[in-house]
Image (cartoon, grey):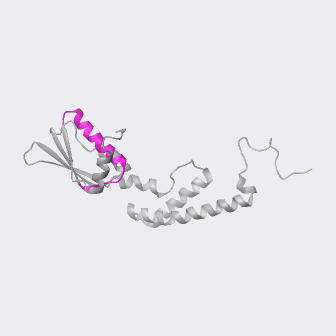
Amino acid sequence: MSSSVPSPAARPRGFRRPVWLSDPNVLRTEVLAGLVVALALIPEAISFSIIAGVDPAIGLFASFTMALTIAVVGGRPAMISAATGAVAKRVAHRAEVTAATDPDGTSLVYRVTGELFFASSNDLVGRFRYATDPDRVVVDLSGAHIWDASSVAALDAVEAKYAQRGKSVEIIGLHEPSAGMHRTLSGELTGGH
């Protein structure tokens, strides 16, 4: 008697046949979910490619390659495999910090420009010269925008590092949405900076 289904002893160890191979309802649901994700991925890949300054065709190819790899190899719950994670690192360096000594020579003014969010906030903390700066430091954020709590935590970390050295920090120039977020969250977060 011949059987098309291998016996459990003949199957490779740890191999389980995917449900979607044998159930047409599950197959239809999986294909529909894949199409929805693919259609959402196209504008995302193009948009992030433009932001990153690369040809949109490269972004589409990279997103397709990543999606195909994850589909074949498998992923983890809540894993970011689209263009979002890749572009965040590139955009993180868009925040610039420049230093200038005040004309009276008693303080140093750091001018921060750019978008401050989770990816750029880690960079921000390392851009100051805590040990060699004068006793009074001004951080001018008039050219920056705070987008999330991690940026507030980074500014708290900057203030704490100066305070450990007996130096004072004044944060100036926040526009209203950023100032509101800073007022609400400052001192409330514990950072790993």
130 sits to left or right of 70: left
User: Measured from the top left, where is residue 117 in percent x and y?
Assistant: 36, 51
Q: Is residue 149 above or below residue 51?
A: above
Q: Which residues are magenta?
A: 142-166
Closer-to-camera residue (60/122): 122
User: Measured from the top left, where is residue 12 in percent x and y?
Assistant: 74, 43
Q: Is residue 95 visible?
A: no
Residue drawn at point x = 11 percent, y = 48 percent: 102
Residue drawn at point x = 24 percent, y = 33 percent: 164
7 sits to left or right of 114: right
Decide whether the magenta segment is chiefly helix, strand or loop: helix
Q: Is residue 105 magenta?
A: no
Closer-to-camera residue (2/21): 21
Q: Is residue 157 magenta?
A: yes
In what quadrant of the picture does the C terminus appear? top left
Residue drawn at point x = 50 percent, y = 57 percent: 82
The image quarter in which residue 36 lies: bottom right
Q: Is residue 170 visible?
A: yes
Closer-to-camera residue (4/42): 42
